[in-house]
Image (spheres, rainbow, N blue to C red):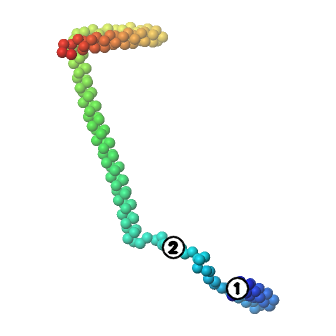
């Protein structure tokens, strides 16, 4: 049946149904399936998106293994951080103890001169506190510069003593 025949049959059926009384209307529909030449036909494969139970279990196991690996890495990182912090604290305490001991020994080598230096410093600070705040600021800036210069003199004498020390 050609397409022209189909159109004619449809027109005839429509005209018969519309011209007949409305009490007994029958509509008939004709369908024709035609085949196209094989060169125009494309084939598609449809794959099911549902997984088999075996694929689901493998997928689930892979997700669980990834999650457990991630958890393991996080726990190792936390443990490493804790150990590092603990070691840093221990080393800091040891260095503070060592530096405190050496500082105390160095100060003891000065002997009675230490007492005199401390007394002079405290007396100077007490005298500066008696002045008005404007004057205190100027005096403290000057006193700080004086102490910095004395530190520079001490550093110079120290380096000279190290160079002149026998066996150096």
Which-is-in-front pick, marks 2 and 1?
Answer: 1
Number of other residues with Cα within 10 Å of mark 1, as a class: few under 14, some 14 to 19, many 20 or more: few
Residue at 29%, 35% in the rendered image: 88
**Can residue 126 be seen from the camera position used here?**
no
User: For this rendering, which residue is in front, 88 or 162?
Assistant: 162
Disc 2 marks which residue? 46
* Residue depicted at 18% across the width and 15% down the height: 167
- Total number of numbered discs in the rendering: 2
Residues 101 and 56: in front is 56
Say which label, 2 or 1, has the lower sequence index: 1
Q: Is residue 39 left or right of residue 139?
A: right
In this picture, is 92 found above or below 132? below
At horizontal 24% and vertical 14% (from top left) the residue drawn is: 162
Q: Please say if the residues under marks 2 and 1 sit with CB atoms less than 8 Å apart.
A: no
Q: Which residue is mark 1?
A: 2
From the top left corner, tell me how far across and down residue 32 is, in percent.
66, 85
Q: Is residue 11 left or right of residue 79?
A: right
Q: Position of residue 114 (x, y in %)?
A: 26, 11
Toward the front, the furthest residue is 39
Instruction: Using residue 59 as the reference point, say whether residue 96 is left or right of it.
Output: left
Left or right, 101 with reference to 136: left
Q: Is residue 28 visible?
A: yes
Mark 2: give few (<14), some (14-19) or many (20+) Cα within 10 Å.
few
Local secondary structure at mark 2: loop
Quadrant of the rendered image containing residue 143: top left
- The image quarter containing residue 24 is bottom right
Q: Residue at x 48, y 70 (%)?
A: 49
**Secondary structure under badge 1?**
loop
Residue 142 in the image, given as x and y percentages of width and height: 42, 9
Q: CA distance from mark 2 to mark 1?
A: 33 Å
Quadrant for the C terminus, please.
top left
Q: Quadrant of the N terminus?
A: bottom right
């Amino acid at each position: 049946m050609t397409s022209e025949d189909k159109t004619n049959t449809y027109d005839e059926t429509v005209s018969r149904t519309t011209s007949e009384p409305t009490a007994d209307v029958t509509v008939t529909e004709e369908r024709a399936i035609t085949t196209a030449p094989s060169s125009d036909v494309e084939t598609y494969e449809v794959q099911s998106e549902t997984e088999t139970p075996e694929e689901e279990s493998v997928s689930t196991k892979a997700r669980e293994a990834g999650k457990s690996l991630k958890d393991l890495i996080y726990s190792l990182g936390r443990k490493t951080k804790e150990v590092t912090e603990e070691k840093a604290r221990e080393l800091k305490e040891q260095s503070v103890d060592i530096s405190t001991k050496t500082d105390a020994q160095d100060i003891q080598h000065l002997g009675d001169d230490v007492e005199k230096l401390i007394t002079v410093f405290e007396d100077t600070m007490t005298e500066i506190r008696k002045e008005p705040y404007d004057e205190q600021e100027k005096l403290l800036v000057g006193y700080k510069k004086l102490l910095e210069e004395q530190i520079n003199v001490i550093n110079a004498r120290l380096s000279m003593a190290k160079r002149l020390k026998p066996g150096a």
